[in-house]
Image (cartoon, grey):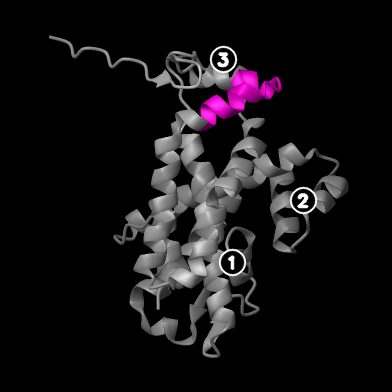
């Protein structure tokens, strides 16, 4: 006997069932503010889960409450900004061409990614702040051409004695191998964007130099990050030391 279908949650502001994710995204892209708000409210539990994920990260890394409390207080506003800015990048026509409909498509995974970016940005900022205050910590960006690539997606720092840690040392090598494989997935235009980003060029400078739109530049960076995450998982699995991208970052930042 098939399981009964779960009832659609009711949106308390309208006293009606929440609209589908696709319909809300379409409305948001047309400038309907109520669609932004409804979609934001629809994923309240996911937001709370990701916010507490950041808090747990701080506690697990023994970060003082005095340090991370300000970030917790600003989490909602920063997540909201990321949420709004990225909404235009949802390519509805492409989704429909692949057979997705309002009934079978959801934005959960994408939203989770947006919120994880906020967490990663906060954790990197905290690590950078703490390492700058500690004399025995040096930047992983030590002049080696391969290691300079670290700054493209995350400001990662590590302890001077990190080479004594087998997993941390492996994480360094894993990044280099995965980054190289990620580059092989890119076309010429994408290579140029990544190359300019490696040189710490701003998005405005990149778009002006290459004659592309900001949206396209951001999509290229997002694609490159996705491929990097993929190759981290595949390469580490093949090496017999399975790691996710976040695992690799954890080993970089662990003491």
| Rendered location of residue 26, percent (x, y) | 62, 19
Q: CA distance from mark 2 to mark 3?
A: 30 Å
Q: CA distance from mark 1 to mark 3?
A: 38 Å
Q: Quadrant of the N terminus?
A: top left
* Secondary structure that dominates the magenta span: helix
Q: CA distance from mark 1 to mark 2?
A: 17 Å
Q: Going by the picture, which residue comes out furthest to the left?
A: 1
Q: Residues within 10 Å of mark 1 (few under 14, many from 20)?
A: some
Q: Residue at x 50, y 16 (%)?
A: 14
Q: Residue at x 50, y 37 (%)?
A: 111
- For marks 1 and 3, the one nearer the N-term is 3
| Rendered location of residue 74, percent (x, y) | 57, 54
**Residue 243 as seen in the image, left or right of residue 117:** left
Q: Are marks 2 and 3 in contact (CB under 8 Å)?
A: no
Q: Residues within 10 Å of mark 3 (few under 14, many from 20)?
A: few
**Bounds of the magenta segment:** 25-40
Residue to which mark 1 is pinned:
155
Q: Are marks 1 and 2 in contact (CB under 8 Å)?
A: no
- For marks 2 and 3, the one nearer the N-term is 3
- Tell me if residue 40 comes above or below residue 9 in the rendering: below
Residue to which mark 2 is pinned:
203
Regarding residue 78, the answer to whether it shows in the image is yes
Residue to which mark 3 is pinned:
97
Q: Can you tell which of label 1 and label 3 is closer to the viewer?
A: 1
Q: Circle 3 sits in a helix, a strand or a loop, which is it?
A: helix
């Amino acid at each position: 006997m098939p399981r009964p279908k779960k009832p659609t949650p009711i949106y308390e502001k309208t006293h009606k069932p929440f609209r589908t994710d696709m319909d809300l995204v379409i409305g948001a892209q047309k400038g309907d503010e109520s669609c932004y708000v409804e979609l934001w409210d629809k994923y309240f539990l996911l937001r709370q889960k990701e916010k507490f994920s950041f808090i747990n990260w701080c506690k697990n890394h023994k970060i003082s409450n005095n340090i991370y409390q300000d970030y917790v207080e600003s989490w909602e506003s920063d997540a909201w900004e990321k949420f709004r800015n990225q909404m235009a990048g949802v390519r509805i026509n492409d989704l429909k061409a692949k057979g997705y409909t309002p009934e079978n498509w959801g934005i959960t995974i994408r939203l989770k990614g947006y919120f994880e970016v906020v967490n990663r940005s906060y954790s990197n900022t905290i690590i950078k702040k703490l390492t700058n205050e500690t004399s025995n910590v040096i930047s992983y960006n030590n002049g080696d051409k391969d290691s300079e690539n670290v700054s493209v997606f995350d400001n990662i720092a590590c302890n001077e004695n990190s080479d004594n840690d087998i997993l941390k040392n492996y994480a360094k090598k894993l990044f280099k191998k995965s980054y190289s494989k990620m580059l092989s997935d890119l076309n010429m235009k994408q290579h140029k964007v990544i190359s300019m980003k490696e040189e710490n060029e701003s998005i405005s400078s990149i778009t002006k130099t290459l004659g592309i739109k900001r949206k396209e530049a951001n999509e290229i960076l997002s694609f490159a990050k996705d491929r990097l995450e993929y190759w981290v998982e595949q390469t580490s699995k093949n090496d017999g030391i399975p790691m996710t991208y976040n695992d690799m970052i954890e080993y970089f930042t662990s003491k």
